[in-house]
Amino acid sequence: RTKIAALYADKDQLDGASVTVAGWVRSIRDMKNFGFVTLNDGSCFRGLQVVLNREALGDEAYDQAVSQSVGAALVIDGTLALTPDRPQPIELQAAHVSVEGPSAPDYPMQKKRQSREFLRTQQHLRSRTNLFRAVFRVRSVAAYAIHKFFQERGFVYVNTPIITASDAEGAGEMFRVTTLDLANVPRLEDGSVDWSKDFFGKPTNLTVSGQLQAENFAMSFGDVYTFGPTFRAEDSNTRRHAAEFWMIEPEMAFCDLEQDMDVAEEMLKYAITYVMDHCPDEMDFFNKWVDKGLKERLTHVATSDFARVSYDDAIKILEEAQDGGTKFEYPVSWGLDLQTEHERYLTEHHFNKPTFVTDYPKEIKAFYMRLNDDGRTVAAADCLVPGIGEIIGGSQREERLDILESRIHELGMDPEQYRYYCDLRRYGGCRHAGFGLGFERFVMYVTGIDNIRDVLPHPRTVGNADF
Ligand code: 4AD
Ligand code: MG
């Protein structure tokens, strides 16, 4: 069988050739003596126009073919023809149609526009619509682009564990992993849970980030990255938070915060350019139906410098906006974390482009970030983008053992838990930095899709874990 993508790519050589295609009916029309099927096989965004000719097929075969419902799986033999004067450049003149799997008439993915909310209830079928075929191909190509970016630069891909005993972000937003019988939990004499009876002999959870283990590998391979699923039991039902999402986390030895931002900026531009170059039909579709300014904006982003501003200055900008009459739901003041509305003000109203905010107060950032000389801020850099807010969180890591230990102590964390992590500072520790790109947020950014549920094949959010 020939893929539809190959028919388009090699159309000039295939003019008049006999080919077999296999796919699903996207639409079907019966004009009595001629019928038209649009067939998708997933190999490219475009469908294939198949012409059914009553005379050529014979009455019985013709009637059987045109009576198929949208969604049916068909295998079609036919002759390819160039049709330069029609909207589609090629068509297949069917010689034989075999119905491999008919589709019931109540097939929910009809060719009309359906709401995203409705489509979310059809997780098993929505990837057959134009929108989701475009989204998930871009997702696949973007993942490849990111791997390619790091591999071309000699980074080693490291798989970090999904089940772990540590809380990399120290935010306590973890999903517990246990084999204990919840109805009959073993308890110690003082009534607390006896974790020694659990599978791993201690409490464990799904990882929130592979960073701590990536740091191990950075101290042997120099430049490494992870690309894997991460899990957060954040009780926030927003359009940019998922309970299960994918993160890309590079970690680089002998690297400071400036260089960290340089890599992040270069990676984003590379991946955006790669997707635009390799998914032109999908990008045209998004530009037409989802976000009219998308392609122009991304082209600009890929070819101009990002803004960089310190947290101190970002707060000044936001305070000035507030004094000038801009209404924020959450107050702005030094020491408070930036809310999505603040991030969006900075990127959409002030800088009008992706913006790194650096050097946040240490109280609102993770324990591992390197303390700045001022003693009150840490060497953090978040990348914020218009429309979404934070897509990257990164930092230079604390490589000084004494400062790291006192920070762990200050925050009341269990030093035993971070023994390996601290050890790295005892055996050839060095300046190093890294960041985490939320993959779904990146896919949202390049497609213009405004809800994380629509860029995850099977989204898991508060109250939703279907299928
Ligand atoms: O800022 P975060 O929490 O940083 C880390 O996890 C670091 N360990 C990264 C590192 O330096 N290696 O998360 C990084 C990114 C965020 O900027 C955001 O894009 C995404 O992960 N993210 C989420 N995406 C979807 N749903 C959630 N609940 C997310 N939480 C974070
Ligand atoms: Mg963050």
Image (cartoon, rainbow, N blue to C red):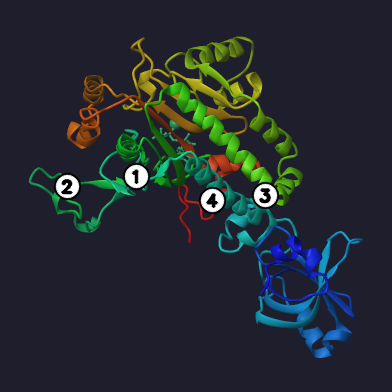
Q: Are marks 1 and 2 in contact (CB under 8 Å)?
A: no
Residue 239 seen: no
Q: Is residue 202 left or right of residue 170?
A: left
Q: Nearer the viewer, mark 3 or mark 2?
A: 3
What is the C-alpha distance between the residues marked 3 and 2? Answer: 52 Å
Residue 378 position (above or below residue 419) = above
| Location of residue 314 in the rendering, given as x and y in whole percent from the top left corner | 53, 16
**Tag on residue 193?**
2
Whichever of labels 3 and 1 marks the residue nearer the N terminus, that label is 1
Q: Nearer the viewer, mark 1 or mark 2?
A: 1
Which one is nearer the viewer's eye here, 282 or 193?
282
**Tag on residue 279?**
3
Secondary structure beneath dot 3 equals: loop
Whichever of labels 2 and 4 marks the residue nearer the N terminus, that label is 2
Residue 215 seen: yes
Q: Is residue 135 left or right of residue 371?
A: right
What is the C-alpha distance between the residues marked 2 and 4? Answer: 36 Å
Q: Are marks 3 and 1 in contact (CB under 8 Å)?
A: no
Residue 299, quarter of the rendered image: top right
| Residue type at numbered disc 4 | Leu
The structure residue drawn at horizontal position 60% and vertical position 63%, both measured from the top left corner, is: 125
Q: Which residue is mark 4?
A: 456
| Residue type at numbered disc 2 | Val
Q: Nearer the viewer, mark 2 or mark 4?
A: 4
What is the C-alpha distance between the residues marked 3 and 4? Answer: 18 Å
Secondary structure beneath dot 2 equals: loop
Number of residue marks: 4
| Location of residue 129 in the rendering, given as x and y in whole percent from the top left corner | 67, 59
| Residue type at numbered disc 3 | Cys
Q: Nearer the viewer, mark 3 or mark 4?
A: 3
| Residue type at numbered disc 1 | Thr
